[in-house]
Amino acid sequence: MKALVWLGPERMEVQEQAEPRPGPGQVVVRTEAAGICGSEVEGYLGRMANRVPPLVMGHEYAGLVTETGPGADPSWLGRRVAVNPIVGCGRCAYCQAADRNLCLDRHLIGIGAAGGFAEFTAVPERCLFELPAGMDARLGALVEPLANGVHALRKSGVEAPGRVVVIGAGTIGLGCLQAALLQGAGQVTVVERHPARRRHALALGAQAATAELGEAGPGADLVIDAAGSAATRRAAVDLLGPAGTAVLIGLHEDETPLPWHRVIRSNLRLQGVFGYADADFQQALDWLAAGRAAIPLSDVRPLAAGPEAFRALAAGPIEEIKIFLA
């Protein structure tokens, strides 16, 4: 089979590899659409220590089950699925509660195991979420990034916030925007420097979109930082009103100084979020299947176009919100 293999910083090529065979409790999925995530672009540039070459990335994907292994339910054969790439141990209290993103022994398909930038992948049966009949595989690939937004809103603890600011309008930021609107936010402002992404945010329902952090205005009930730089984390705190909540989902930088006197004296709440629970993944799938959430869809490109797609994304934001490979 063909696979897009990352070989090191800014080095990627399509190679021939042996097709995977399913182990106990696993199935084989033939990729129909796999989206390129911003974290994978950072990995391509060599900025993500958790990605070790040679590696087949791809954790946002959907496809067709073509084979089942020992102990896996044979009825999965021939069903189209979105893949939840978070693989927990399956035994701990977090996994038993369907909170595999909290499992201390978790790994991600596309990081700890070969991912969707290949013709076939072997994945645990428990990572499968069936797509409704006729659902576009590209929408199936969007379940993973939208699930991040669903989880961010749920963990914020803010029900139907009056005013929300989302920092960053990549796929995760746009997922947070749509989750906020679908959960009853009164007004959502998006901060994004790239003009095409601001237009996308407005088309998806944002009431305002600005290029500068200082133009969003203070007093928000909820700020979601989908960028994760020192500047955006500081802005997330500065933009909050008293007793507001900042949800920190972006992973660009590790350590960031914050004005802790303001955090304490204004009774602010800072909530880190990573991944999603199974219920968040299913909610995202349901919204996409029902047409309640989406982004403009570009055509699926062949794996051979992958190296150039990564080079283009590494050079800076492009017009397309999401590039799909298969």
Image (cartoon, rainbow, N blue to C red):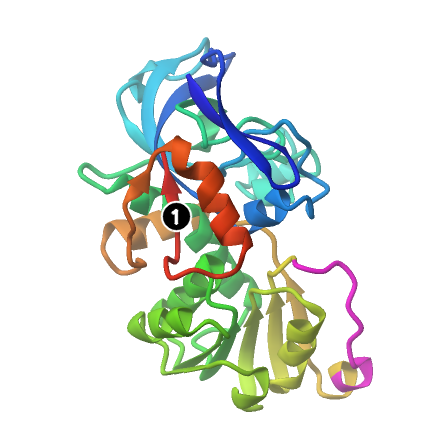
Q: Residue 176 location in percent, x, y?
A: 46, 64
**SS class, disc 1:** loop
Determine crowd level at label 1: few under 14, some 14-19, many 20+ residues with C-alpha closer than 10 A: many
Q: Quadrant of the C terminus?
A: top left
**Quarter of the image where one finds residue 209:** bottom left
Question: In the picture shown, does residue 288 fall above or below 326?
Answer: below
The residue to which callout 1 is attached is 323
Q: Position of residue 175 (x, y in %)?
A: 42, 61
Q: In this picture, is 224 found above or below 215? A: above
Q: Which residue type does callout 1 highlight?
A: Ile
Which residue is at 60% across, 33% downward? 88
Residue closer to the observer: 179 or 155: 179
Q: In the image as oriented, which residue stretches furthest toward the top? A: 70
Asked whether 190 or 146 is in front, the reply is: 190
* Magenta stretch: dominant secondary structure: loop
Q: Does the stretch in magenta take in 309?
A: no
Residue at 59 percent of width and 65 percent of height: 227
Q: How many marks?
A: 1
Read off the magenta span.
252-262
78, above or below 39, in the image: above
Q: Work out whether residue 92 or residue 256 is closer to the camera in this orientation and state it.
A: 256
Residue at figure coordinates x 58%, y 90% from the top left: 218
Q: Position of residue 160 (x, y in %)?
A: 43, 76
Horizontal side of 260 relative to 123 (left or right) equals: right
Q: Quadrant of the N terminus?
A: top left
Is residue 109 at least partly visible in the picture? no
Q: Position of residue 90 (x, y in %)?
A: 58, 29
Left or right, 55 with respect to 326, comes to right
Give me the residue at 46% from left, 42% from top. Answer: 308
Look at the image and tell me whether residue 4 can be seen.
yes
